[in-house]
Image (cartoon, grey):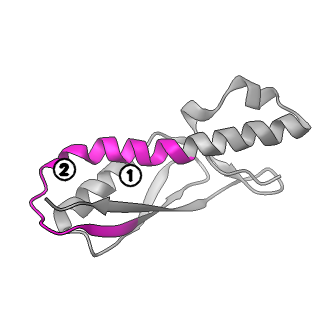
Amino acid sequence: MPRAPIYKSCYSKRLERAKDDRLLKELSEARECTEKRIPNFVENQLSRVIESSSTSKTQRGNIIFVIEADGSVTVQKIDSSFDKDFAEKAKKAIEGLPKFIPGQDAKGNSTRVLYILPITLKGQ
């Protein structure tokens, strides 16, 4: 069964021991937890940058990154709509994500998984 990467703090012993229907429920909970943790982590890392931003307009864009087969994170692209300073700090924030439990393909092999994280930088 294919599995999305899991944020390490979202992985539980229940998931490790789960079988059949319970496994699907545990995987779903781990995925939901991961989907909340990623933007929370990045937002916390960028909070000072956002507060000190001198931009007067709202900027929206995406950060595209890959969770590698070893659980590490590699930034692929940051939208050019962000100013250079913010883009550099956003890249550092994404690269600072903790190592993940890697995603798996249907055969159980670790695999790379692409993520797109939308970011809104509100002007003052």
Quarter of the view holding residue 81: bottom left
The chief SS type of the magenta part is helix
Residue that appears at 51% across and 41% down: 99
Quarter of the view holding residue 27: top right
Residue bounds of the magenta highlight: 35-62
- Tell me if residue 21 comes above or below residue 119 in the rendering: above
List x then y, in percent, for residue 83: 19, 68
Amino acid type of disc 2? Val
> Which residue has dot 1 on it?
94
Is disc 2 placed on a helix, strand or loop? helix
List x then y, in percent, for residue 98: 46, 39
Q: Residues within 10 Å of mark 1 (few under 14, many from 20)?
A: many
Q: Earlier in the sequence, mark 2 or mark 1?
A: 2
Amino acid type of disc 1? Ile
Quarter of the view holding residue 10: top right
- Tell me if residue 52 comes above or below residue 8 in the rendering: below
Residue that appears at 24% across and 54% down: 89
> Which residue has dot 2 on it?
49
Residue that appears at 13% across and 59% down: 124
List x then y, in percent, for residue 36: 51, 44
Compute the Cα span from label 2 to label 1: 14 Å
Lateral position of residue 111 relative to residue 71, left or right: right
Q: Which numbered dot is residue 11? A: none
**In the rendered structure, does residue 99 fall within the stretch colored magenta?**
no
Between 13 and 31, the one lying in front of the other is 31
Q: Quick one: which residue is furthest to the right in this view?
A: 20
Is disc 1 placed on a helix, strand or loop? helix
Residue that appears at 83% across and 52% down: 1
**Tally of marks:** 2
